[in-house]
Image (tube, rainbow, N blue to C red):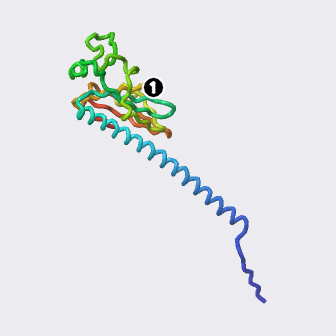
Amino acid sequence: MCYKFYRKGITLIELLIVIAIMGIIGSIGTIGYQSFVSGSSFGSNKTILLKYLEKIRFNAFADSIHYKVTLSNSSGDLLLKVYEPDSANIKWRNLDLNRRCECHSGTNTADNTCTNSFSNSPLSSLISKSVYDETLEGLSVKSCTSNTCTSETTETIELCFLYDGSSPIDQHFKITGLSNMASILTLNKTGYVEEN
């Protein structure tokens, strides 16, 4: 007599092994997805920043007026503000002076000819053009001394766009996202911002 044993179902151990494998695959997928999302958020904020600066450069040229942009950190976010020269100040119209003095606001003790070249008062006492105010969440900025950013400082960065669309100096700065993704950007004298 021949007996056949048929198995009906799976054992508990087989079920636990399948669940463990699905958990491992799921955790790998979650880590990859989170990395993808944070990377796309940083890339999107960087693109918004570059387009914002390009828009201000274009508007400085179109409006025939210098604009000063500040990039400042505030609770893990990047605040963007735009300032224009005092209407009572006529020194800002001198393009060569502002190029040499780097759009200086207020009193300059090093060079008296640069005093009030952009505005009669320090930038901190000017009111920003609220139509240009913007906040980029999860982004911070640091000032750099070179395009390799070997020395960085956390301070408000002032970028100047002259009315001919150019900038008085090359300026380097580093933006960093929440996931420690970073990019070094340079505002060239031509007025264009590029990634290093």
Q: Classify 169 as above or below 194.
A: above
Residue count near mark 1 (Cα–Cα under 10 Å), binned few <14, some 14–19, many ≥20 = some
**Residue at image point 30% right, 21% down:** 86
Q: In this figure, which residue is indicated by the disc labeled 1? A: 154
Q: Secondary structure at mark 1?
A: loop
**Residue at image point 71% right, 74% down:** 9
Where residue 79 sits in the image (x, y, percent)?
43, 32
Relative side of 65 to 8, left or right? left
Where residue 19 sits in the image (x, y, percent)?
65, 61
Q: Residue furthest bottom?
A: 1
Q: Residue furthest front?
A: 88
Camera-nearest residue between 122 and 33:
122
Camera-nearest residue between 135 and 89:
89
Q: Quadrant of the N terminus?
A: bottom right
Q: Classify 139 as above or below 105.
A: below
Q: Classify 52 as above or below 114.
A: below
- Quadrant assignment, res 70: top left
| Number of numbered callouts drawn | 1
Q: Quadrant of the C terminus?
A: top left
**Residue at image point 40% right, 20% down:** 125
Q: Residue furthest right?
A: 1
Relative side of 8 to 108, left or right? right
What kind of residue is marked 1? Thr
Where residue 110 sits in the image (x, y, percent)?
31, 10
Q: Classify 169 as above or below 5.
A: above
Where residue 188 sits in the image (x, y, percent)?
28, 31
Relative side of 128 to 28, left or right? left
Camera-nearest residue between 1 and 118:
118
Camera-nearest residue between 174 and 135:
135
